[in-house]
Amino acid sequence: MALRVGVLAYPGCFASEVYGVPDLLTMAGHLAGESCYDVSVLSPRRRVTGSGGVPIAVAPVRPVDVLVVPGFELRPGLDLDAELAGLRPEIEAISAAARSGSAVVSICVGAFLLAEAGLLDGRESTTAWLFAGKLARRCPGTTVRPEKLVATDRGITTTGAFSAMYDFALDLIREHSGSRVARATARVALVDDARPSQTPYVDAALLPAAGSDFAQSVKRRLDRTMGERYDLGQLSAAFHVSTRTLLRRFREQSGQTPLEYLQAARVRKAKHLLETTDRTIASIAAEVGYLDPGTFGAVFARLAGHRPRDYRAAFGRNANRPGVGA
């Protein structure tokens, strides 16, 4: 029996996220040799115009096994309260689908609609890494996992940014049609079916700054002295406070310890060097403050989701040249 999948289109949604999942499911059906998926684009409205003025043909909302909610343009300065208030018909449709037993899935910042429908409270979730903090602040009842590409918790699934819709679709194909069809679909579509995390794609320079003047001053000093050995006592003395006071104030204002910030800053700089230079991993490790390449590799893997060599192979400018970065 075909799995009934509905995509909920709404004003301003990303048209590519409306059609991305259905297109991959269509490929999977062809590769499986049968009609495995009954996919439709649904809306409580008669007409829908997506982002960029793209008209989207829709059918009335009907019962489905899986309801997919695409994302929208969460641009700087957008009044999110007003945006979501204008989508009450869609939010009510999402709530009704969940009550009826449908699995509900959001793509990217579609998670904000699920949060507004009350579906994320008490659940683990994810969204585009750039907006994970905003989702956590808006919906404190959910545990946001920004490193995850796909998070499923008791029938509610959320995905990371944009292309994570394909990670979800491949998971759905794997569950409904088997691993062979999922692998074949990924190969035909040139989609990576083994991505473990959003973490390698995070660009900290795009994230909003966090922390007050004190925390920002500490961060600037840590940035300047990144290549030196971390010494909490010396850092505290530089700001004329006790180590306990420094730790307390820094955490209150930034949500981190100084060491956590320093490790993230070191990895951020190392990622840039791995992407843009041919320097050895050992020399990069030393520049960002690690005399032991093994320790550097472990910290880098934990925060970036890849070992340094693998990160360079995936994101470096010379990714196709063998032997670089030994």
Image (spheres, grey):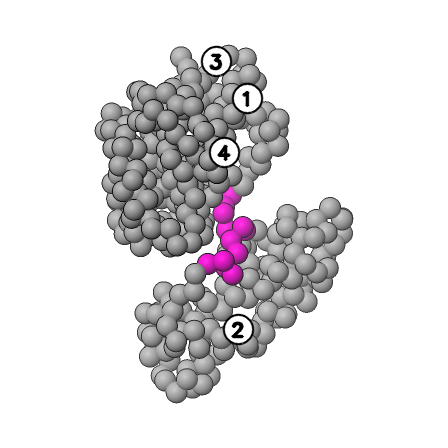
- Residue 302: x and y in percent read 50, 55
Q: Nearer the N terminus, badge 2 or badge 4?
A: 4
The mark lying in front, picked from 2 and 4, is 4
Task: Compare residues 124 and 323 and report the one nearer the observer.
Answer: 124
- Marks 1 & 3, CB-CB < 8 Å contact: no
Cα separation, mark 2 vs mark 1, equals 48 Å
The residue type indicated by label 2 comes to Asp
Circle 1 is placed at which residue position?
Answer: 27
- Marks 2 & 3, CB-CB < 8 Å contact: no
- Marks 2 & 4, CB-CB < 8 Å contact: no
The residue sitting at 41% across, 47% down in the picture is 74
Instruction: Say which element carries label 2.
Output: helix
Badge 1: how crowded within 10 Å, few (<14), some, or many (20+)?
some
Instruction: Say which element carries label 4.
Output: helix
Cα separation, mark 4 vs mark 3, equals 23 Å
Circle 2 is placed at which residue position?
Answer: 223
Is residue 93 something one can see in this rendering? yes
- Marks 4 & 3, CB-CB < 8 Å contact: no
In magenta stretch: residue 169: no
The residue sitting at 40% across, 38% down in the picture is 12
- Residue 132: x and y in percent read 39, 51
Cα separation, mark 2 vs mark 3, equals 56 Å
Cα separation, mark 2 vs mark 4, equals 39 Å
The residue type indicated by label 4 comes to Ser
Circle 4 is placed at which residue position?
Answer: 16
The residue sitting at 41% across, 51% down in the picture is 131
Instruction: Say which element carries label 3.
Output: loop
Task: Tell me which segment is drawn in magenta.
Answer: 196-207
